[in-house]
Image (cartoon, rainbow, N blue to C red):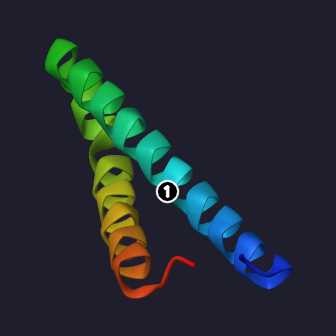
Amino acid sequence: MATPTEKNHNKHLDLLHDYKIYLIKYVETLEKIDKQSEFAKEWNKNTIKERKEEIQVIDKILKNLIRF
């Protein structure tokens, strides 16, 4: 049976995973908008790059942490 600390740890991992999924959907939405508008493409360029880097960091965290 998991201890309260382990449950809390797992809850935070779940929240981090949910945030990663949110970021992936957000980037996909921005990329769809980019296809429709050249202005939006330039506008969203840095945001997409930063979010993709953030997704990579979250992936590394999730892969290296142990789930109880």
Q: How many marks?
A: 1
Rendered location of residue 18, percent (x, y)? 53, 48
Rendered location of residue 25, percent (x, y)? 38, 34
Quarter where residue 12 is shown: bottom right
Disc 1 packing (10 Å; few <14; some 14–19; many ≥20): some
Under mark 1, the amino acid is His
Q: Relative to residue 66, is residue 30 drawn left or right?
A: left
Quarter where residue 51 is shown: bottom left
Which residue was labeled with disc 1? 17
Viewer-proximal residue among 55 and 46:
55
Quarter where residue 4 is shown: bottom right
Q: Relative to residue 7, is residue 51 drawn left or right?
A: left
Q: Looking at the image, which residue is at 52% across and 77% down?
A: 67
Q: Looking at the image, which residue is at 49% across and 56% down?
A: 17
Secondary structure beneath dot 1 equals helix
Quadrant of the snapshot with the N terminus: bottom right
